[in-house]
Image: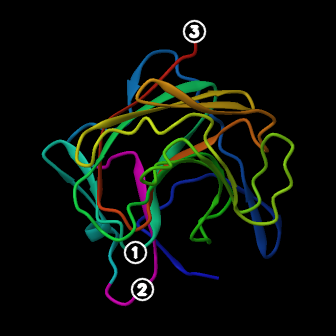
Amino acid sequence: MLKLLPCFVLACACFVAADEMTVKAEPVRPAQKTALFNGKDLAGWTKVITAEPGSCPDTTWSVADGMIRCTGKPFGYLMTQTSYADYKLCVEYRWYGRTEQMNSGIFVHKNGPDNFFLPKAIEAQLKEDNAGDFVLLSQATLNGLENPKNLRVEKKAASSEKPFGEWNKAEVIVKGTAIDVRVNGVLQNQGTGAYADSGNICLQSEGGPIEFRNITVEPLH
């Protein structure tokens, strides 16, 4: 098991046994379009990275020129401190440095403890040339599929990503246990019967230097 370095974690817990806890966050259903990133700092977010010699969450995740910047090293994620349900999430992203592995992702329905490199969640893949795939993390389930570990569900359309260095727009629409993913306006994937109907939203650090901006949630219409 990989150790993680959480910057901080806010949650309400109730004890069910002397040596274990269960955490239940009441999800927010947006009533209006709301920015999740204020363009100045990472208020409202938690930084989580794998524990490696010399690693620091503030190095992996930072804010520059009104954007969230992620070095991609070490692995981890930036997580909202609020759980969400029934919403449309919009995220703009671009790669700002070429490495061997241009990889990142957006997690929805993140549930459970922050004690794995890959928490239990459904990932909308942003990996170069694969944006729009689903990756079902840590035995998360979707579409009735069995998932012993981290199952990939390929996107349905040809790549709609823009050339390297240009801004892309990812949209993730969550309605109950159904999830749709669009990349630059193209419907890339759809899923139903997710293992959860709410959870935290995360941006992933997984090797590729990436920037994010204009991160919003809004109600479904």
Dividing the picture into quarters, in which one does residue 40 lie? top left
Amino acid type assigned to the residue bearing label 3 in the image: His
Q: Which mark is residue 74?
A: 1
- Residues at marks 2 and 3 touching, judged by CB atoms closer than 8 Å: no
In the rendering, at what x and y percent does residue 94 appear? 29, 46
Amino acid type assigned to the residue bearing label 2 in the image: Glu
- Which residues are drawn in magenta? 42-54
In the rendering, at what x and y percent does residue 213 appear? 28, 39
Amino acid type assigned to the residue bearing label 1 in the image: Pro
Q: Secondary structure at mark 2?
A: loop
Residue appearing at x 31%, y 67% in the figure: 60
- Residues at marks 1 and 2 touching, judged by CB atoms closer than 8 Å: yes
**Mark 1 / mark 3, whichever is N-terminal:** 1
**Mark 1 / mark 2, whichever is N-terminal:** 2
Q: Secondary structure at mark 3?
A: loop
Residue appearing at x 75%, y 41% in the figure: 196
Q: Secondary structure at mark 1?
A: loop
In the displayed structure, does residue 109 sit left or right of residue 71?
right
In the displayed structure, does residue 161 sit left or right of residue 125?
left
Up the image or down, 192 lies above or below 62; here it is: above
**Mark 2 / mark 3, whichever is N-terminal:** 2
Q: Nearer the viewer, residue 24 or 127?
A: 127
Q: Quadrant of the C terminus?
A: top right
Disc 3 target residue: 221
CA separation, marks 1 and 3? 38 Å
In the rendering, at what x and y percent does residue 111 appear? 67, 52
Disc 2 target residue: 52
In the displayed structure, does residue 103 sit left or right of residue 87?
left
Q: How many marks?
A: 3
